[in-house]
Each structure stands twice: as C-alpha cells, then as structure tokens.
Image (cartoon, rainbow, N blue to C red):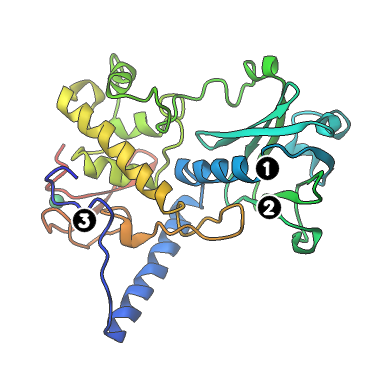
Amino acid sequence: MDGGGIPAGGTIVTLRASPLVRRVQDQSKYHARLIEDCERLMPELPEIANLARQMTKQLKGKRITDLDVTQPRCLNMSVKKFRRIVGKSVEETNARGKWLFTNLYPDDNLLLNLGMGGDLRHHRSSATLPKKYQLRVTFDDKTGLTVTFSWFGYIHLASDKELLKHKMTNKLGISPTDKEFTVEKLASLLSGRRGAIKSFLLNQKNVAGIGNVYVQDILFRARLHPLRITQTLTGSEIEALHRSICEALNQSIRLGGLKYERDLYGRRGKYGPEHFLVAYKTHEPCPGCKTAVVKIRTGSTASYICPKCQKL
Ligand SMILES: [Zn+2]
C-alpha cells in the first residue's frame, strides 16, 4: 500500500470482549441496512466478476438440454426463438460492467443482467430449485442453473454479429479488470472530459462496473473529492486513481464480493463494512487522519468523504 496509512486488506481485529462484539455486530447490521436503503443492492463489478469466474469453472463444456422461461418479458425475443440455445455448449463467461456474457457454441451469447438483488444459482439436482425463477437451464449432466430476479433484470441472447448491435451493452466502457485498463488508458478516457470525477466513474460508458458502493472508497484512497473537476487532475492524481480503482475492486473480488450479495452456490461474499474506509461511515474517524467522515450530497447521489483528506 502507498504510505497513506490505509490498511490494504482492511483492518483485522480479534474481538474478545462480548459487549464490543455485540456493538460491532450491531454496527454491521446498521451498515447493511444503510447500504440497502441507499443502493438497493445493485451488484457491482466484484460480484459480477466473481459469478463469471464461478460460471466458467462450473459450466464450461456442458451442453444445454432444456430450458424454462417464466417471465418472457425479460427476454429480447420470443421464448420460441430463445429455445435455439437448446443443444448448444457453454463456453467462457466474462463480466463487463453489471453484465455477464456467456459464450455458447456455436455462435451465440447469453447476456444476463441481474438488476437489483437478482440471484444466479447452480443446482446439482432439481432438489434445490427455488420455487420462483425467471429462467431455468438444464444441462446434459442433469445439473441446472436458475436466474431469479427480485425486481427486474434482463436475459438476452445475441449471435456474435448481433452482439455488436446490442444496444444495452455495446456502449459499455472498459472493465477495470481488463488487461487494457492501464493508467494511460484511464488518462486518455479522462482527457477532454468535463464534469465531476465521481460522475465520470459512475458513467458505465467510461468505465463499466463501478457503482455508488465502491466509488466512495476509490475516491478516498486516491484522496480526491467526488466533485473534483476531471480536467484539473494531475498525472500523479490519475495514477493514484487508477491504483485505487484496481486495489479497491481486487480486494473485494478476493473476498468474494459484498456480504449482501450471494455467489453461484448461494454463499455470501466476505467484503463488508469492516473493509470499508469511509463509505457509509458518517461520524466515524477517517482511517488516515481521524477526522470525522461526513456525508454530502453530490448531484443525485450521496457521498462519504473525509473533509480533510479529500479537499475540493
Ligand atoms: Zn482523513
């Protein structure tokens, strides 16, 4: 970590005193509720990247033998047309922004967007199938996959050629997990842009996959105020921002994503409030300088900043 006094892997504290444990647990619930209220649990890149990795590992090489769609309006075509995936084989799954792209052989791509609080689950047998789902896919080894939306999401299909014209994803920006996401790339994306850095980062056409949960600590790590005008960023600030994006997202990916989201096997992630630096920590001390964190309004979103470390 750069000498900024921020723990790279979050603070790990062994708690023995039970009242303290209780306080921390209460605090954790409080944070979960806060985030739920504020963000309505939109999975961001670490959660999607984790699902993509698990899907590739679990499903690659399997052949689709059947499917069941219970909510046809999630599809971008009729159920009858959608059935063209039966008989196709599953290849790699990749994350881009909040979308999962699963390559099917021959010439097809399954595009999933889980929306808010959606659930993607692998099943060893039909015994664990949920009562409600929007899509169920069965594979040649009798295992299955279900997609369940708690609000609304998308299940689209596109051939390789159709993928280039797919309106909801073809303008998505670079994924911060891509090899091509370098400091130079970020600098070139920023050049000539107007507006605040936070809006730039949240715009999925610039960089895909950062939402209002991770952006807070990304800006704090880079010591940037959310309303800082992009044109005024110096070379070393852009470098710090690039490093912060990679560190914050990778730390969460390593921990399996946010605690409030579940993976392909129904397990919760381990990235929780104890790993957050200033996000959702109003009145708590800044991990760098101990100044109390404040919550401010930045356009249509709320921001959590250290007023001393992130000066405008
Ligand atoms: Zn501070």
Q: Is residue 292 above or below residue 78?
A: below
Residue at mark 3: 293
Q: Are marks 3 and 2 in contact (CB under 8 Å)?
A: no
Q: Are marks 1 and 2 in contact (CB under 8 Å)?
A: yes
Tell which of 235 and 304 is nearer to you.
Answer: 235
The residue depicted at 31 percent of the width and 45 percent of the height is 216
Residue type for callout 3: Val
Disc nearer the start of the sequence (1/2): 1
Image location (x, y in percent) of residue 52: 56, 40
Disc nearer the start of the sequence (1/3): 1
Under circle 2, the secondary element is strand
The residue depicted at 25 percent of the width and 61 percent of the height is 11
Instruction: Point out which mark residue 177 bears.
Output: none
Residue at mark 2: 122
The residue depicted at 41 percent of the width and 54 percent of the height is 255
Residue at mark 1: 59
Q: Given this view, does label 1 or label 3 mark the residue nearer the observer?
A: 1
Q: Given this view, does label 1 or label 2 mark the residue nearer the observer?
A: 1
Which image quadrant: the N terminus? top left
Under circle 3, the secondary element is loop
**Cα distance, mark 3 to mark 2?**
40 Å
Tell which of 299 and 61 is nearer to you.
Answer: 61
Disc nearer the start of the sequence (3/2): 2
Image location (x, y in percent) of residue 296: 27, 48
Q: Note whether residue 204 is visible.
A: yes
Quick check: 190 left or right of 268?
left
